[in-house]
Amino acid sequence: MEIATIVTIGKVAIKLGEIGWDAYCEANRVDADAFSEERCRALLDDHRDTDEILAAHGVSIPE
């Protein structure tokens, strides 16, 4: 597993937004694969709405 570059991680954070990124990080804090180059690229290539992307990864944004 290769950790994604800071640029790739930054692009994912921008795509998910501050609240979405925080929720993604919290849900995956013990899963280093969540921040792999492969997973981050897949998140960037996913054209669904942010809520749908997060739900597909088992993440929900707190109300």
Image (spheres, helix red, strand yellow):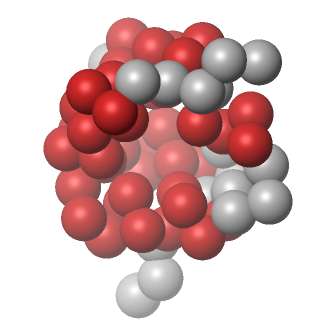
Image position of 57 (left or right of 52):
right
Q: Is residue 15 above or below residue 54?
A: above
Residue for point 59% across, 49% down: 55
User: In the figure, is residue 50 to the left or right of 57?
Assistant: left
Q: Measured from the top left, where is residue 12 in percent x and y?
A: 33, 35
Percent of width and height locating residue 41: 46, 14
User: Is residue 53 shown above or below 20?
Assistant: above
Q: Position of residue 46 (x, y in %)?
A: 41, 18
**21 relative position to 7: left or right:** right
Q: Residue furthest bottom?
A: 63
Q: Nearer the viewer, residue 32 or 27?
A: 32
Which image quarter is the C terminus in? bottom left
Q: Residue at x 60, y 27 (%)?
A: 3
In the rendered image, residue 33, in percent from the top left (x then y), is placed at 74, 34
Residue 53 shows in this picture? yes
The quadrant of the rendering that contains the N terminus is top right
The residue located at (55%, 17%) in the rendering is 37
Count the marks. 0
Could you tell whether 40 is left or right of 15 in the image? right
**Can residue 46 be spotted in the picture?**
no
Identify whether 17 is placed above or below 46.
below
